Image (cartoon, helix red, strand yellow):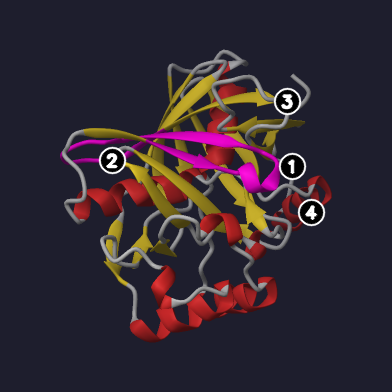
């Protein structure tokens, strides 16, 4: 067994603290679920990936926050792909996850995952009202051009779009958000997004269910954003967008999302070991 620590979705310009930290535990066959949870809690990152049955072209992956197992994690998948590429795997590795097979193109410095099929639904009015209260936002903060939605893909989560200036002053009620996430079973973050331009977005993602106040980079939410934009006809296709996240946490991150006319949305990010 080998425990590695990476930061995924690092920025293009060198930044010593960019990207979202993730644990990657390779050859974890000897670990029970309780062992995995204990290691994830000890590392203290929002997610740690545990890889078993590793071959040059495949691996079984489970993801744990410091609090519980979750179905999928984008940034830990990117980190795992880079870790396996450095061990000679690739160029494509099939990750068997709790949400199905995720194909990951891997290199020693970056990886691209093909997100699982995603469904975009409306967000119930009662839930939106309760969520806005937990986030300390009002209906007037929302962007009327991009209605709130509920995304079912790697992890189920709501998706909100806000007007200019709202993200910089975001100060959510951590305990209220956690109660809502626990009650509704929302494993993922809660992405709050502002559209900067046609193909560039800024996002902040509260994630108390992951044991942290805010996630610096969320690949699964970025994939959900791509599916949302396609489903609603909010951009010309095919398209490539970029998502800026993490600056408010001191860990600026950059996520690239490819949105085809049909088929799986693809999410790309660079990654490096902590300390590199």
Is residue 70 at least partly visible in the picture? no
Mark 3 Cα-neighbour bin, 10 Å: few <14, some 14–19, many ≥20: few
Determine which of the numbered discs, if any, sits on residue 16 in the image: 3
Counting residues from the N terminus, which is met first, the one under dot 3 or under dot 1? 3
Secondary structure at numbered mark 4: helix
- Front position in the image: 187 or 162: 162
Secondary structure at numbered mark 1: loop
Instruction: Using the image, determine if residue 74 lies above or below residue 147.
Output: above
At 20% from the left and 56% from the top, the residue drawn is: 232
Rendered-image quadrant of the C terminus: top right
Question: Are the residues tagged 3 and 1 within 8 Å (C-beta)?
Answer: no
- The image shows a total of numbered marks equal to 4
Mark 1 Cα-neighbour bin, 10 Å: few <14, some 14–19, many ≥20: few
Counting residues from the N terminus, which is met first, the one under dot 3 or under dot 2? 3
| Marks 2, 1: nearer the viewer | 2
Counting residues from the N terminus, which is met first, the one under dot 3 or under dot 4? 3
Marks 1 and 4, how far apart in space?
A: 18 Å
Magenta-highlighted residues? 242-267
Residue 248 lies within the magenta run? yes
At 26% from the left and 61% from the top, the residue drawn is: 145
The reply, left or right, for residue 209 in relation to residue 263 is right
Residue that numbered label 4 is attached to: 41
Residue that numbered label 1 is attached to: 30
Marks 3 and 2, how far apart in space?
A: 29 Å
């Amino acid at each position: 067994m080998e425990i590695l620590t990476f930061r995924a979705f690092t920025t293009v310009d060198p930044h010593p603290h960019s990207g979202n930290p993730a644990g990657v535990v390779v050859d974890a066959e000897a670990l029970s679920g309780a062992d995995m949870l204990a290691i994830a809690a000890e590392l203290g990152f929002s997610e740690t990936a545990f890889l078993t049955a590793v071959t040059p072209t495949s691996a079984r992956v489970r993801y744990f926050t410091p609090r519980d197992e979750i179905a999928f994690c984008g940034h830990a998948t990117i980190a795992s792909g880079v870790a396996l590429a450095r061990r000679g795997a690739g160029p494509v590795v099939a990750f068997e996850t709790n949400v199905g097979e995720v194909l990951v193109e891997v290199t020693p410095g970056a990886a691209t995952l093909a997100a699982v099929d995603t469904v975009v639904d409306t967000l119930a009015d009662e839930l939106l009202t309760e969520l806005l209260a937990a986030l300390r936002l009002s209906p007037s903060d929302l962007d009327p051009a991009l209605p709130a939605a509920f995304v079912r893909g790697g992890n189920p989560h709501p998706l909100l779009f806000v007007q200019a200036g709202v993200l910089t002053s975001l100060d959510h009620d951590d305990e209220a958000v956690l109660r809502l996430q626990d009650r509704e079973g929302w494993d993922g973050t809660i992405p709050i997004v502002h559209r900067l331009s046609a193909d560039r977005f800024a996002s902040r993602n509260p994630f108390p269910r992951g044991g942290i106040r805010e996630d610096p980079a969320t690949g699964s939410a970025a994939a959900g954003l791509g599916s949302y934009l396609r489903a609603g006809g909010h951009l010309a296709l095919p398209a490539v967008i970029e998502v800026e996240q993490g600056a408010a946490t001191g860990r600026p991150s950059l996520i690239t999302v490819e949105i085809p006319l049909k088929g799986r949305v693809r999410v790309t990010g660079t990654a490096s070991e902590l300390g590199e």
